[in-house]
Amino acid sequence: MYRPLRYRKDDPEYIKSFIKKHPFATFVTKGANLLATHIPVLLEEDGSNWKLFGHIANHNDQIGNICDGEEALIIFSGVNGYISSSWYEEKDISTWDYTAVHVNAKIIKQSNQELENSLQKLVSNFEKNQESPLYYKEIPKQMREEHLPLITGFWLEPIKIQGVAKLHQSYQREDVKNSISHLENSGNPCDSELAKAIRKENNIE
């Protein structure tokens, strides 16, 4: 991934927190063709080590690339948005601020039991804050048993991890403040989240 030095984010805690906050990832594999699927990918920790897990449907063309030892690229995208140079004090080139984490990982297929355990964790992760959560084991048994053979689960053991956060570092402070103000007042919730990230990265109260 292209990462100018000032935008690099390599702190392990930053990486893990980012993945947990932005679990809907782009899962990329290379077989006869380059293929990608958009899926939730969760992080599982074991002491100081961690790995990822996910699953895809067996009728997905990408299933042929799910083989032990094969490499995948998992892309987690965070806040991003257009920054107009019309917000600056002097004319300049407009840009796009963004945050992302890329993980190159080795694929390890899950056993049926591992897949079922992963589904429990996946559902729990997203259901726990619902008003009336419906957990995996509460889904009718027959429905669960009919569903399992239709999907393939896998572990993703990290080989290479890269984080990036292009958030107007090194820009003139007044231009950064003006950009934050315009984003906060755009009425777009995504812009508001980007403004928060820019404010935090540049230590602007």
Image (cartoon, rainbow, N blue to C red):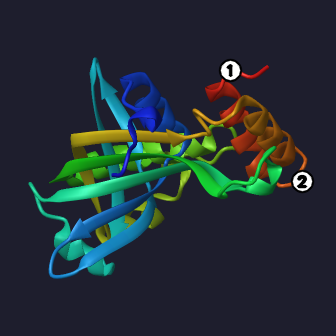
Q: Position of residue 196 (x, y in %)?
A: 73, 34
**Side (left or right) of 139 relative to 3:** right
Question: Around disc 1, counting alpha carbons within 10 Å, would you say few (fewer than 14), some (14 to 19), or many (20 or more)?
Answer: few
Q: Residue at x 65, y 26 (%)?
A: 202
**In the rendered image, which quarter is residue 174 located in?**
top right
Outermost front residue: 90
Name the residue type under label 1.
Asn
| In the image, residue 186 above or below residue 200 | below
Q: Which residue is mark 2?
A: 187
In front: 122, or 132? 122
Answer yes or no: is residue 179 visible.
yes
Q: Residue at x 62, y 39 (%)?
A: 168
Name the residue type under label 2.
Gly
**Label placed on residue 130:** none
Q: Which residue is mark 1?
A: 203
Q: Residue at x 35, y 34 (%)?
A: 44
Q: Position of residue 118 (x, y in %)?
A: 36, 46
Q: Residue at x 35, y 61 (%)?
A: 27
| In the image, residue 170 above or below residue 35 | above
For marks 1 and 2 on the same chain, the one whose residue lies earlier in the sequence: 2
Question: Could you tell me which quadrant the C terminus lies in?
Answer: top right
Question: Around disc 2, counting alpha carbons within 10 Å, would you say few (fewer than 14), some (14 to 19), or many (20 or more)?
Answer: few
Q: Secondary structure at mark 1?
A: loop
